[in-house]
Amino acid sequence: MAQRKVVLAVDAAVVLATPVLTGRARSNWIPSLDKPVTKELKKESYDKTGGEAIAAAQSVAAGIKFGSDVYISNNLPYINRLNQGHSQQAPAGFVEKAVQAAKGAIEK
């Protein structure tokens, strides 16, 4: 299904584009069906690689049915600041750039 491909591409692009120090920001890209997640993921340690977040998207994508709404949320209080360029690891607008890159990859 095309929607699964889009979800997986966008999720992976956004997760991997997110600056990483502790892995908290990458780990908090949380995919969900039909309603956005409104809470922050809190753990003792976070996956710096983003692999766990990407695996979560694969699990959610497997449950997509025709007409499903899919959300990829990040509720960290500082995610907007990161996206505005407050980290030297990623440019301002990295979320939008990641979505555009995923869109370009899908259209090929």
Image: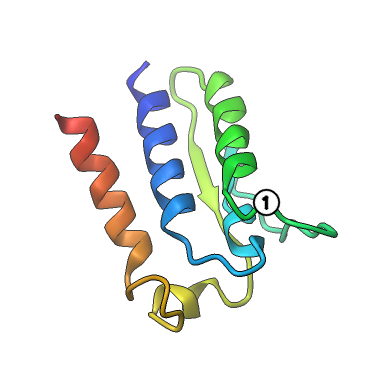
Reply above or below: 62 against 37: above
Residue furthest toward the left?
A: 108
Indicate how the structure is coloured in the image.
Answer: rainbow
Side (left or right) of 33 relative to 108:
right
Can see residue 68?
A: yes
The percent position of residue 39, horizontal first and vertical second, equals 72, 59
Look at 33% across and 73% down and name the residue there.
91
Which element type, helix, strand or loop, lies under badge 1? loop
Quarter holding the C terminus is top left
Does residue 61 appear left or right of residue 107 in this picture?
Answer: right
The residue at 52%/22% (across/down) is 64
Q: Residue 52's spot in the image, x, y percent?
A: 64, 41
Foreground pick, 53 / 69? 53
Q: Residue at x 72, y 56 (%)?
A: 46
Q: In this orientation, does residue 31 appear?
A: no
Q: Which residue is mark 1?
A: 47
Local crowd size for mark 1, using a 10 Å CA cut-off: few (<14), some (14–19), many (≥20): some
Residue 94, above or below 68? below
Q: Quadrant of residue 5?
A: top left
The amino acid marked with disc number 1 is Asp
Residue 16 in the image, given as x and y percentages of width and height? 45, 51
In the rendering, at what x and y percent does residue 58 appear? 55, 28
Q: Quadrant of the N terminus?
A: top left
Residue situated furthest right in the rendering: 44
Q: Is residue 94 left or right of residue 104?
A: right
